[in-house]
Image (cartoon, grey):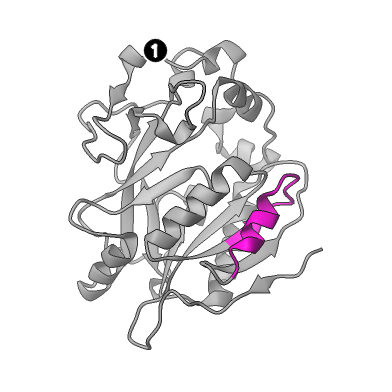
Amino acid sequence: MRKVKYQSSRLIVGADKVRAIAFIMVRDGGPYVEHCLTHLVKQGLEVAVLDHDSTDATYAICENWLDKGVCCLQHVPYRGHFSLREQLLLKQDLIRRLNPGWAVHQDIDECLEPPVGFSSLYEWIEVAEKENFNALNFNEFVFIPHVAANEPFYNSRHYYFFSPWSPRLMRGWKCSAELSALETGGHVLKGDLRLFPDAGYLRHYLFLDQAHAYRKYGRRSFDASEVAQGWHRNRLDIPREALHFPEKSRLEYLPSLGSKAFNTHNPWKKHYWQMTK
């Protein structure tokens, strides 16, 4: 097993500054890693990475980011299936060891942004800290890679607003508040919750292209106990034809890359592949 690697932060200095760390667990996330780490560092956060026995360049890429934003890189053995509970417990343990002021839970295929009016996630955290809030919620926008063959999938502007209920994705929290999302699969925090009134934006780039959609959900194996508990239902036994991307006409469209002019008046209660099962 590879050793845990730590680096001291050069991003946030001064005893009066809040230390904020994003915690990511990833397996074979090569196409996402550079973009994800670059974004989080620009947002003023440090990053702790748990590499789930990647077979691609993910670990090596993260090593290159040590002391450039990544403050911890840890190898985790892969047991042949995806376990969300294991992921959350490992993140919980690492949060205790690193002891930041605020933690952010995110996946490698996501891009988290603050509400309008804040220049960065870190500024949002600072304001929440000063105003005595202890948790941050995000609205999820799922992007479908309707892009030209030579364009990166991040250039997609076609999306749907995924919101089965609200508030739903409490991905940032003050660590001393001792909140936990373990029983809700990492979604809703439980405890003495003081939620910031405005939601941030979570851009979700689930798939690189159509072939990746077939691979990603056509053969993923989940922890049996979690399935029995009712988790992962929207990713189980998906027929191949259900994973065909929805037509552009069914989706919302951003006027420009990076725009936050999202339409939240037409929330999807299910993912597109659930609607055709």
Residue 212 is drawn in which quadrant? top right
The magenta segment is: 49-66
The tally of labels here is: 1
Between 157 and 181, which is closer to the camera in this rendering?
A: 157
User: Hey, which quadrant is residue 251 in on the image?
Assistant: top left
- Identify whether 64 is placed above or below 115: below
Q: Residue at x 62, y 36 (%)?
A: 227
Magenta stretch containing residue 140, yes or no? no
Decide: is 141 above or below 188: above
Examine the rendered structure and indicate whether residue 58 appears above or below residue 224: below
In percent of width and height, residue 163 lies at 33, 34
Tell me the amino acid under the disc marked 1. Glu
Query: Does the stretch in magenta take in 52?
Result: yes
The answer to whether 124 appears left or right of 148 in the picture is left
Which of 135 and 70 lies nearest the eye of the viewer?
70
Left or right relative to 218: residue 178: left
What residue sits right under mark 1 in the picture? 247
Going by the picture, which residue comes out furthest to the bottom? 15
Residue 198, image x, y percentages: 21, 53
Looking at the rendering, in which quadrant would you find the N terminus?
bottom right
- Residue occupying the far right of the picture: 1
Q: Nearer the viewer, residue 24 or 239?
A: 24
Residue at horizontal 56 percent and vertical 11 percent from the top = 241
Q: Identify which residue is drawn at 22% across, 31% down.
A: 263
